[in-house]
Image (spheres, grey):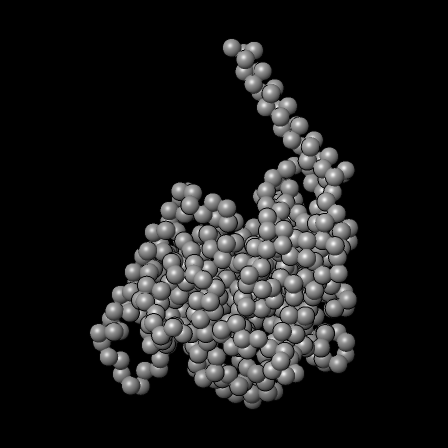
Amino acid sequence: MGTTISSVVGSILSGVAAFIGWNLFKQLYLPDPHKPPVVFHWLPIIGSTIYYGIDPYKFFSECREKYGDCFTFYLLGSPTTVFLGSKGNEFILNGKLRDLNAEEIYGPLTKPVFGKGVVYDCPNSKLMDQKRLLGPGLNGAALKSYVPMFVKEVEDFISSSPIFKPETGICDITTVMAEITTYTAAGSLQGKEIRDRLDAEVSLLYRHLDDGFAPINFVLPWIPIPRNIRRDRAQKAMAKLYLEVIQQRRTKSRSSDEQDDMLDILMKSSYRDGNQIPDEEIANLMIAMLMGGQHNTSSTGSWIVLRLAHDPALIEKLYQEQCDVLGPSLPPLTYDHLQSLTLHNNIIKETLRLHTPIHSVLRKVKTPMPVPETSWVVPPSHTLLAAPSFLGRTPENFPDPMKWDPHRWDDPTAGLVPAPIEAKDDKETIDYGFGAVSLKSIKSPYLPFGGGRHRCVAEKYAYTQLGAILATMVRLLQWEQVDMTKEVPPTDYSSMFSRPMHPAEVKWRHRKV
C-alpha cells in the first residue's frame, strides 16, 4: 500500500516538474515573435500574479524597463497583455466595442453586488444610457445643491461620533473617512428615507455588499463562502429596501418644495427606446451608485488627511486660504466657494495623481488586435490591461514624481505638470451615449477618472464631495502624524480598490477659533 502511494505521489511530482520545465523551455527558447514578450515566471497558471498583486506599479515599472510599454504576464492562468503609456491608454480605453469587452471581465464580480440589469450586467448600449440618466443628478444645479448636505454630514459626524468626543485623540482615518463618505453620498444622492436608516440596518448591509468585491470573486463569484452568502442576502435586502421606498413615493405625493433627488430623477426617466426604467433596475442602480463611488472618495479622502498629517503647516495654510478668499467669518460653504479655493483643489489633484484608487483597467479581447508600430497581435485569448494612473508616476510627465507636492499645480506654465489636453472642435469628440467626450483627453498623463466610454460619469461630483469634506474638516479640526518620524503608510493593493495600509492613524484635536 505504501509503495502504491509513493508511486502515485512520485508520478504527480514528476508531472508537475515536467509541466514547470516545459513552461520554462517555452519562455526561453520558443517565444512567439508575433505576440508581445511574456514576463518571465517560474510557475505556470500562477505566473506573475503574486508579484503584480503586491505592488502593481512596481511590477509595471520593472517590466517596462525590461520589455517596454507592451508585455504579457499570466494572471491566475489568464494571459494578460499590459500596454502602458498614452498609446496604451488610447489603444485600450478608446478601443472599439467590437474589439474589447468590459462586461465579461467585471460582470461576474459586480452583478452579485449591484444586481441584475445594470452596469456590467447589460449590453454596453444600455450601460451608456444608464450613465446618461444619472448625469442630471451629478452635475449642474443638483451638484450645487449638494454642498450644504456634504458640509452638514461632516459637521454632524464630528459633533456626534464617539471618536471625536474628547478634545484630542487618535483615530484610524480610513474608518472615519469610510463613514463620512458613505453619509455624504447617501445624504446627497440616496434620499432621506435611505439616509435615515443608514446608521443601523443599511450600514451593515453595505459592509456585507462591500465584502463581495474580494479579488477571488473575479474568478469564483459563485463560490458559497460565508462572505458571498452574506453578499447575496445583503443584495436582496438592499434591493427590497429601495423597492419599498419607490413604492411609497409612487403612492404618496411629495410636497412641491421638496427638491428631486437621484431616486426621483430615475423614477421619472425612460431609456432611449422609450421604455420606463423598471423599479428593480432603479433599485440596483441606486446600490451601484452608493457602492461604486464611495470606495474612490473614501480612499482619496484618507490619503489627503494622511498626507496633510505629515505637513501640519499646510493644514493651517488651507485654513488661512479660506479666511483670505471667503472672509474671516468663514461663511457657509457653497459650490462657488469651492471653485475659488485653489490650494484645496491642488491638494485633491495631487493626491489623485499619486493615489488613484483604481490602478488597472481590464478588457477582454474579442478580435485580433494589432499593436501599433509593432509586428505583434494580441489574440482573443488574452485580456488587455491599461494603467491610466501609471503615467502620473513617471518623471517624463511629472518631475520628481513620487514626491507629494500640491504646489506643482500652482503655475501650469512652470513645467511641473503637463498642459491639459482638450478637444478644440467637435470633430475631436465622441458621444458614447452619455455626452460628448474629448478623444484627445485620453492622451493626458493625468487620468484619475479613466477615459473613453467607461470614463467615470461622477467626476465633478467626486471633486465637489472631496472639496467640501476637506474644507469642513480644516474648519473643525487640526491633525498631525502620530509619529512624525514615520513615513506615510504604504498602499494596500489586496482589494479591487487600493487604499492606505492599516494602521493609518492620525492625531487630531478640535480647532479652537
| Image quadrant where residue 268 sits | bottom left
Q: Nearer the viewer, residue 240 or 409?
A: 240
Horizontal side of 390 relative to 184 (left or right) equals: right
Task: Please report the residue visible at 35 percent of the width from the left and 74 percent of the height from the top.
Answer: 274
| Image quadrant where residue 271 sits | bottom left
Res. 77 in view: yes
Q: Position of residue 332 (x, y in %)?
A: 47, 84
Task: Please report the residue visible at 51 percent of the width from the left and 10 percent of the height from the top.
Answer: 1
Task: Please report the residue visible at 31 percent of the width from the left and 70 percent of the height from the top.
Answer: 193
Q: Position of residue 451 (x, y in %)?
A: 59, 68
Task: Please report the residue visible at 39 percent of the width from the left and 66 percent of the height from the top.
Answer: 286
Q: Nearer the viewer, residue 221 or 272?
A: 272
Q: Nearer the viewer, residue 292 or 472?
A: 292
Q: Position of residue 309 (x, y in %)?
A: 62, 66
Res. 196 in view: no
Q: Is residue 316 above or below residue 81?
A: below
Q: Is residue 263 above or below residue 330?
A: above
| Image quadrant where residue 16 sits | top right
Horizontal side of 485 relative to 189 (left or right) equals: right
Q: Residue furthest left?
A: 251
Q: Nearer the viewer, residue 211 or 15?
A: 15
